[in-house]
Image (cartoon, coloured by chain):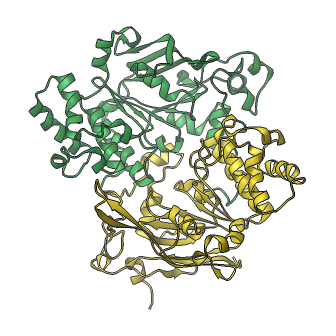
Amino acid sequence: MGAQPLMRIENLVKHFHIRLGAFGERSATVHALDDVSFDILEGETLSLVGESGCGKSTTGFTLLNLHRATEGKVIYQGRNIVELDEKAMRPYRRQLQIVFQDPYSTLNPRMTIGEAVGEPILFHKLATKAELPERISTLLADVGLPPRFASRYPHELSGGQRQRVAIARALACQPKFIVCDEAISALDVSVQAQIINLLLDLQQKYGLTYLFIAHDLAVVRHISDRVGVMYLGRLAELATREELFEHPLHPYTKALLSAVPEADPVHERSRKRQILQGDVPSPLSPPSGCRFHTRCPIAMDICSKVVPEWREARPGHMVACHAVTEGLPG
Amino acid sequence: MMMANDFRPEPATNTGERLLDVKGLTIEIDTRRGPATVVDGIDLHVDKGETLGIVGESGCGKSLTMLSLMRLLPNKIKVTKGEANFAGRDLQKLSNAELRKVRGGEVGFIFQDPMTSLNPVMRIGQQLAEPLIYHRGMTKAQARKRAGELLRLVGIPGPDERLDAYPHELSGGMRQRVMIAIGLACNPQLLIADEPTTALDVTIQAQIVDLVKELRDKLGMSVVWITHDLALIAGLVDRINVLYAGTVVEDAPVDALFANPSHPYTQGLLASIPKLTDERSARLSSIGGTPPEPGRRPKGCPFAPRCPLVEQICRDRVPSLEGIGQAGAHRVACFVAQRKLEAA
């Protein structure tokens, strides 16, 4: 892929300070994101996968400057956008949009669909009041809803229809980049497929770039160009979807892939799963060295002491694992 | 390390003897506009030692059906017709006191969200001991000992110390293991698992599925696993019932269902799961539209408005579940599929 990076994320860190105890007498730091670096290429779908609490949503929020980064840079159009204040950020906000998981809580129940979709258009002065109804109809048509929906309220819509409205609202700003934060996770299987198809159609039509945050690996495998695997606030592996699903290198990726059920009873009954024991450790005090070493089936001495370097193991295939890097030259 | 495994010892295999037999069960919700049918004359059965998967999308009535058997429905939802025979008794006719003996005793439950199903201010040891004292008449000391054994059975590390923990001190996966331990406390003949892994991560989900599989084989009980995820139960169940808008639209042995899905809804569900072999960005086949709302069910086949194969008869009449293939083990409620088979 010869595409240019649309966004470059360098050593991004996000720590949350929280208070513990009944009276908040103790404080602690949640290591939500530590030293994460990757590029997002123009026009691609990059997916981030991992278990809850691995920092995939935090990544999405932080690179849109919705959470303030603790350290690190997000370079977009030559600017480090995470150091911008809200006012300086505004012109970028239009281009960088997000669609959330829960279509029930993202829409204002007292606003009609038309008002919800029209609001960002007026805010960013992308159309005059006279042009607005026309523009709203076009957007609704883009997401497969008839124009009469403009006068309806969110409670009159099904989950899939609401998610279409949320997408229309993101599209209203004519964005370049959309973070889809578990955007299809709350939907039923048959509706999920409709929304996936819609996202793919819109990407083609408008040349959109997606950061797709999800935990469903079957869906991720279907729509991604590249996939990043996160574990406890760090990237474990990042590669093209073929590389990652055919030749996973990191032991965590392998375990994750082996846990995904396939819709094939004969295969499922005979397959040997590599099941990870135990739970994900707390991000309040992540394990030293490689954060995966407490559950890793091939952990070595060095893994508990030294943080593995984020390196290219094969062309375009990044991984952070001592066992993998050991086998590499240099 | 636990391994998913193909081996099933004899005791857990299907004996062909009915354990649960639900006939014509109808459930209605009281709405402001009058009663609305959510489960429409459903028939289903579970044999001894059998694992049945119930699959359907939200609102299809899969959870309500199982909850109704144990009289766990909320106030405004009522069973209006039908019977449910369990081990020779009609559950609908039992008194509340009699049913209480079945609930948690002969029939164990695991729910989706262990955080809301567990009592947050009770130590898990007490919660495990409760059914043992109630159903089995154990003393507190006996129950505590058994509770420790149960935690060990479901693979909780340091089980005896964990007895004194509160639910919030455990992770989601561990809480679900505690729920399973409670469900199994009285050696039930039937375990009903209502989306027990939906709230869990994929690696933990795999642990729980394998755990239930292992325990089922060890204890020889029947299992009903309710889910919306066909792939998840592919390697776990013997038979699948696909539910749509409160009726069973297809009933088939698991291999037959995946190899030869016969109802257009089942076909649509299977086709909308992304496959390994798909091209990147290939369009997924999807089912247009949404399921009917309760109270707005179409007159004929409930799937007719979304069905790609719909004919006039489908809009006029409701198809019944008829056997196709040998011995009627594979049944489908679809005029088009039934006719296709007759012609062949």
Q: In the visual, does B195 lie left or right of B176?
A: right
Task: Name above or below for residue B321 compared with residue B2.
Answer: above
Q: Position of residue A36 (x, y in %)?
A: 49, 75
Which chain did the image draw in green?
Answer: B
**Image quadrant assignment for residue A224:** bottom right
Is residue A246 among what the camera can see? no
Q: Position of residue A52 (x, y in %)?
A: 45, 57
Residue situated furthest right in the rendering: A130
Is residue B47 among what the camera can see? yes
Task: Name above or below for residue A167 compared with residue B141.
Answer: below
Q: Nearer the viewer, residue A215 or B308?
A: A215
Q: Nearer the viewer, residue A164 or B260?
A: A164
Residue situated furthest bottom in the rendering: A330
Q: Quadrant of the C terminus of chain A?
A: bottom left
Residue at the image position 42 percent from the left and 19 percent from the top? B69
Residue at the image position 21 percent from the left and 22 percent from the top? B135
Instruction: Please tell me the colour of chain A.
Output: yellow
Residue at the image position 46 percent from the left and 43 percent from the top? B198
Q: In the visual, does B91 lie left or right of A199?
A: left
Q: Position of residue B323 (x, y in %)?
A: 59, 21
Task: Name above or below for residue B44 compared with residue A314.
Answer: above
Q: In the visual, does A2 lie left or right of B29?
A: right
**Image quadrant assignment for residue B179:** top left
Q: Nearer the viewer, residue A271 or A98?
A: A98
Q: Quadrant of the N terminus of chain A?
A: bottom right
How many labels sit on residues?
A: 0
Q: Nearer the viewer, residue B116 or B328?
A: B116
